Image (tube, rainbow, N blue to C red):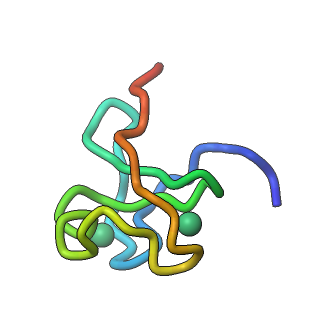
Amino acid sequence: MALEMRGACERCDAPLDHNGLAYICSFECSFCGPCTRQLAHKCPSCAGELARRPTRI
Ligand SMILES: [Zn+2]
Ligand SMILES: [Zn+2]
């Protein structure tokens, strides 16, 4: 699995703007803000903690 920024939330498939609010776990699972809140900042795939994704480009 490539380490690249995904373009959509893995839970609700909402598009994630590179400059917008997004959360990512240590295994590169990406989620939107509302889903992250509903998941209590815990990744449903790997149980890792979801952290704010750095904004770049
Ligand atoms: Zn979502
Ligand atoms: Zn994960």
Q: What residue is drawn where x is 47% and y is 51%?
A: 24
- State left or right for residue 1 relative to residue 20: right
Q: What residue is drawn where x is 35% and y is 40%?
A: 52
Q: Nearer the viewer, residue 1 or 48?
A: 48
* Number of marks in the rendered image: 0
Quarter of the image with the N terminus is bottom right
Q: Quadrant of residue 53?
A: top left
Q: Nearer the viewer, residue 12 or 43?
A: 43
Image coordinates of residue 49 in percent, x first then y, are 44, 58
Q: Residue furthest top?
A: 57
- State left or right for residue 4 relative to residue 16: right
Above or below 21: residue 11? below
- State left or right for residue 2 relative to residue 28: right
Image coordinates of residue 34 in percent, x first then y, are 17, 65
- State left or right for residue 35 relative to residue 1: left
Above or below 41: residue 20? above
Image coordinates of residue 9 in percent, x first then y, are 40, 65
Q: What residue is drawn where x is 68% and y is 44%?
A: 4
Image coordinates of residue 27 in percent, x first then y, are 65, 57
Quadrant hosting ligand 1: bottom left
Q: What residue is drawn where x is 45% and y is 70%?
A: 43
Above or below 41: residue 19? above
